[in-house]
Image (cartoon, rainbow, N blue to C red):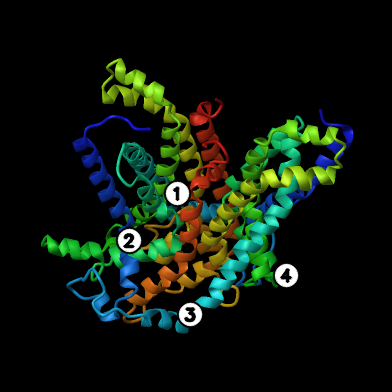
Amino acid sequence: MATKQTRALARTMMAPAVIVLFIWMIVPLVMTLWFSFQNYSLINPMMTGFAGWANYVYVIGDPSFTQSLINTLLLVGGVLLITVIGGTFLALLLDQPIWGQGILRIIVISPFFVMPPVAALIWKNGFMHPGYGMLGHLWKFFGLQPVDWFNQYPLFSVIVIVAWQWLPFATLILLTALQSLSEEQREASEMDGANAVNRFRYIILPHMARAITIVILIQTIFLLGIFAEIRVTTGGGPGYASTNIAFLVFRTGILSNDIGAGSAGGVVAVIIANVVAIFLMRAVGKNLDA
Amino acid sequence: MARRVSVQTRIGFTVLAWVIALLLFSPILWTLLTAFKTEAEAIASRPTFFPQNFTLENFGAVQERSDYFKHAINSILVSFGSTILGLIIGIPAAWSMAFAPSKRTKDILMWMLSTKMMPAVGVLIPIYLIFRDLRLLDTVHGLTLIMTLINLPIIIWMLYTYFKEIPVDILEAARMDGAELWNEITHVLVPMAVPGIASTLLLNVILAWNEAFWTITLTSGRAGTLTAFISSFSSPQGLFLAKLSAASLLAIAPILLVGWFSQKQLVRGLTFGAVK
């Protein structure tokens, strides 16, 4: 179909995008790898030269690394669990014949447009603050001692905030998928006398499988890099209780000015992201082929 | 559309849906209300729902303390600048992939998507050092450049899925009529592509506006965007809940309106065209 001339033109038009993305992907990554094997600190200029595996040993050997890794998995897993189950439930609810569906959609999607630091700060101060947060008032109303969320349950608090931001995303996508289920199919299953549970299990859930897969994939990409929510609420603490890998790299490389160790952490973060991506693609990839 | 259900069931579902929706919305609603309260009222031990002494002084105080307008202008420059730059690079690429596909087109698209999988922290340190050496730290153009690069794969993917839907027959008919390539683009393709380009623009402005990793790590005072502006409120000084709420409201209101306006196109853009 396309002539030789068109094809040459097509390549030229594609070139800028491919070239900038290639540079963006390769150059910093190679530099990170290079730095990760160097003694390089911004505070101590005397520290130079090849470091071998020392930076990796330093980063991975530190107890903070294991904890950050576990925190990262808990954060991603916890948010996925809440948003996929909650999103499925909400999508099913919003798909019912209810009054004000259009306005409800807009209200439900709103948290997704709130920038991460704002989401974190309004939860931290307006809701979770033991003195004047809404939850504090609620606890006092029931005669309970208000909870100091960020000191007592730091990681859980971060999970709640992030889940609040991503629940609308899951809901909106699952609702869109649900609404593409044909009316005939539903009516046929109702006529055949299938009850609600069976309809959900054999008709609705298989239809939504692809959308759920996509929600999991896309959210995982973003959730592995959660940063601002931690930065403005707990600062990774107390101790390392709410530090994930992304925040650990920032803490080591930028806050402590240890470029070598920070880079080693960065390389580890890239490896983890790739492992998770491959694992996810394998586990849920078959849904994507359709 | 209209499934037959009893009125009681319908009322039940409606009430349940509204209660849950309002609970999800309550942090935003609470922020909106608190922004117009006095500081004393905001942290009173007996909370009020509506502001008792309606006041606008929090907004003035926020502007005075942290210069909202400067940050808002930076946010506008970075989000629109990066999106437009991304469209300039992305439109020709998506066009050629949609209308002159080769065997490698699918691979190139997948590869572009895979660059999104790379965690930002993996490249934070080199980018930070390069920016330091090139004096790009805390500059609007430096941040715009990074934002363009991180959103380019999404821009190309979105445009590609929209362009894919333009019937090729029309382009061929134009070619038969002897239309030059340039005419083909300006007279046939562009009018049909404008809605897709507009949705791509809106979604990417939203994503860039809310991006909070690079904006916080690469800027401080001068080029700070609204995400950096709001982060400066993370350490409280004295009475501040009402002011924080006012600042939060100022930071999210513009993009919330854009988001409500474009939520229909959002699903497709965020799923790379996989869910429509």
How far apart marks 3 and 2 lie (CA) works out to 23 Å
Of discs 4 and 1, which sits in the foreground?
4
Instruction: Give the residue at mark 1.
Output: A69
- Indicate which disc residue B66 carries: 3
Amino acid residing under circle 2: Pro
Instruction: Give the residue at mark 2.
Output: B27
Instruction: Give the residue at mark 4.
Output: B134
How far apart marks 4 and 1 lie (CA) works out to 34 Å
Q: At numbered mark 4, what does the secondary structure look like: helix, strand or loop?
A: loop
Question: Along the polypeptide, which appears first: circle 2 or circle 4?
Answer: 2
How far apart marks 1 and 3 lie (CA) works out to 36 Å
Badge 4 density bin: few <14, some 14–19, many ≥20, Cα 10 Å = few
Are labels 4 and 1 assigned to the same chain?
A: no
The chain holding disc 3 is B
Are circles 2 and 4 on residues that touch, CB within 8 Å?
no
Of discs 1 and 3, which sits in the foreground?
3
Q: At numbered mark 3, what does the secondary structure look like: helix, strand or loop?
A: helix
| Position above or below: B234 against B12 | below
Residue at horizontal 23%, vertical 71%?
A131
Q: Nearer the viewer, residue B6 or B61?
A: B6
Amino acid residing under circle 4: Leu
| Position above or below: A111 against A274 | below
Amino acid residing under circle 3: Ser
Amino acid residing under circle 1: Leu
Quarter of the figure with residue B4: top left
